[in-house]
Image: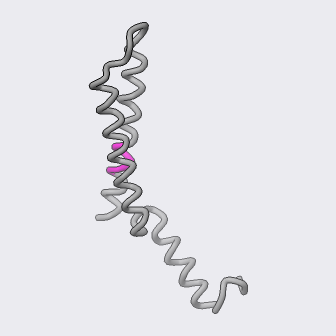
Amino acid sequence: MGRTFYYLGRLAQLIGMWMLLVDLMMAGPAWPSPKLFGAGVAVFVAGWGLTRALREHKVGPWSDLCLTSQYRIARVGSAHNL
């Protein structure tokens, strides 16, 4: 379940960046729309915050690797023997 939220956060980051790029490209000689630009920033920051919070709890695609390396270190006795 945690990985689902992690990938939803990553998707929110992509959508936020897409909104920012569309706003900048569609603006032309005029200034970008403040509402669309603000929404893009808000969506991107929300996605970044979600992935950051889950990363601190070791939820994500790398969590199995972290557990495997900790198991190897505990099994061998110390990291210096690797």
Determine the residue positioned at 34% across, 27% down.
37
Determine the residue positioned at 54% across, 81% down.
70
Q: Hey, which residue is sitting farthest right in the picture? A: 81
The percent coordinates of residue 9 (x first, y second) are 35, 50
Location of residue 25 (image quadrant): top left
Q: On the picture, is 30 further left or further right than 64?
A: left
Determine the residue positioned at 31% across, 57% down.
5
Task: Decide which of 77, 39 is in the foreground and name it.
Answer: 39
The percent coordinates of residue 43 (x first, y second) are 31, 40
Quadrant location of the C terminus in the rendered image: bottom right
The percent coordinates of residue 72 (x first, y second) are 59, 84
Q: Quick check: is 26 in the magenta stretch?
A: no
> How many labels were placed on the picture?
0
Q: Quick check: is 9 in the magenta stretch?
A: yes
The percent coordinates of residue 60 (x first, y second) are 42, 62
Location of residue 69 (image quadrant): bottom right
Q: Is residue 11 above or below residue 41?
A: below
Q: Hey, which residue is sitting farthest top in the picture? A: 29
State the extent of the magenta-drawn residues as a range: 8-12
